[in-house]
Image: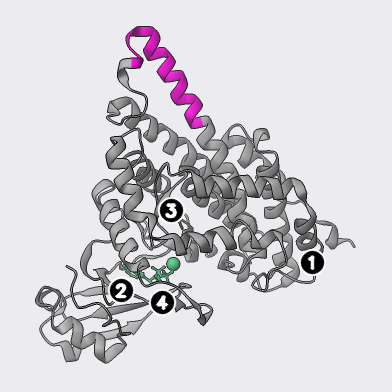
Amino acid sequence: MTGDRAGDYRILHEAALRDYLAGLPDLVALLGAEPVSWSITEVGDGNLNLVFIVKGDRGGVAVKQALPYVRLVGKSWPLPLSRAHYEYLALSKQADLAPGLVPALLHHNETLALTVMELLEPHIIMRKGLVAAAQYPRFAGDITAFMARTLFFTSDLALSAAEKKEGIAAFAGNHALCKITEDLIFTDPYRIAEQNRWTAPYLDGLAASLRDDMDLHVAISRLKLKFMASPEALLHGDLHTGSIMVTDSQTRVIDPEFAFYGPMGFDVGAVLANLLMAYFASAGHERAPGERAAFEGWVLETVEQVWNEFARKFLDLWRAGAAGDAYPASLFAGETGAARLEAERQAYMQRLFADAVGFAAAKTIRRIFGLAHNIDFELIEDPRRRAISEARAVRLARAMMVETGAFPAIADVTGAARKLRDWMPEFVNG
Ligand code: ADP
Ligand code: MG
């Protein structure tokens, strides 16, 4: 599936892309025999890459090509093309481990940093649906299957030590993408950085307080170290609601170009954080009261299901047959051994939950003070209303990060979110 000589990278805009795909018989068969009649539209709304949708009379595909720089910023911020290789590798692995939950891969060209995949249609980006107060009853079940399976089966609980280290090595070169996370999530929001922005003037005081808050600086630094130094499992690495495409009956995870071996709580926390942000943003959007209440109720219920079902599925996989080198069965023989191992599994999940709570908080704060914001908040046009929603999310996030122990269960997180639903930040009266 890979081809071409090194050094032949070029950006394939419409005509060149048409010619390129026309040279691939399998894709011609899928699209329809008349390349001139294919429609080609660039739809990339992400921060980094080009995405084209190509449609012929028989079918369609999505084509993703990496640019040698960050799309959102421009050529002044170079970024290695190799991320397309890691994205392809991660998608292949996820397709094996969590069948039906990622787009099917159709073609990859390493030199062009280009991947052709199944066209997801009529799926939409989940975040867009959440902004429109849509509910996705299948989401919790699907995303927890995705996370439980991809995380468990790439961990030391399931793999031999050799397999695990080969896995780490295969993704270790994706460090430029990790560095983006290390800077944009774990560092910049807490210091003066050119790329930071927030809803001024309302959040000016909060932004300044983040820069002086040493409890928060210790907490975010611990999380950063955990992100850098804990290769527990193959992470998606960017598992927010903009990396998930949905219909009422299907969930597909896309865009794993940040994949690497890291702490499991980072992926789980990303999902929780993005649901919580949708919850807090809800108050800022024009919504009939009944619709608002129904949506917010569903979101918090989903937050609880995401953790509870993830934990249940992960534990089921562990109990059903952990073939990995961690926790050797020979050390836990007999009834006493089984009981101690089960207690240890519960303790493991408790630590993982605390990690997820901390990472969820980090993910929230970066979306409000850092470079990349999200439409949950950005589409609240009135800046004062937006700032109120954002301040509520930040209040919860700070508590989750600094007082993580005060959130021993997911119900503590949703309970705290509920309490903040109508809380008013100081700038409202000041
Ligand atoms: P980036 O890495 O630049 O963030 P994404 O992988 O998130 O790129 O894709 C950008 C957009 O392209 C998505 O938000 C989605 O609208 C569209 N897209 C990506 N993959 C597909 C697909 N397989 N089918 C349909 N649309 C897709
Ligand atoms: Mg994206």
Q: Which badge, 1 or 2, is on the more N-terminal residue? A: 2
Q: Please state which of the two labelled residues, at mark 1 or mark 3, is closer to the viewer.
A: 1
Q: Which residue is mark 2?
A: 113
Q: Please state which of the two labelled residues, at mark 2 or mark 4, is closer to the viewer.
A: 2
Amino acid type shown at disc 4: Gly
Amino acid type shown at disc 3: Tyr
Residue 109 percent across, percent down from the top left: 23, 72
> For residue 280, which quarter of the picture?
bottom right
> For residue 414, which quarter of the picture?
top right
Q: Are marks 1 and 2 in contact (CB under 8 Å)?
A: no
Residue 265 percent across, percent down from the top left: 50, 43
Residue 22 percent across, percent down from the top left: 15, 84
- Residue plotted at (61% across, 69% down): 371
Q: Which residue is mark 4?
A: 44
Chief SS of the magenta region: helix
Location of ligand 1 given as a quarter of the image = bottom left
Do we see residue 278 in this rendering?
Answer: yes
User: Who is closer to the viewer here, 69 or 266?
Assistant: 69
Q: Please state which of the two labelled residues, at mark 3 or mark 2, is closer to the viewer.
A: 2
Q: Secondary structure at mark 2?
A: loop
Q: Secondary structure at mark 4?
A: loop
Q: Secondary structure at mark 1?
A: helix
User: Who is closer to the viewer here, 341 or 168?
Assistant: 168
Amino acid type shown at disc 1: Asp
Residue 242 percent across, percent down from the top left: 46, 63
Q: CA distance from mark 2 to mark 4?
A: 15 Å
Q: Which residue is mark 1?
A: 204
The question of residue 337 being in magenta is answered with yes
Tell me if the residue at label 4 has its CB under 8 Å from ligand 1: yes
Magenta segment, which residues? 331-349
Q: Residue farthest to the top?
A: 335
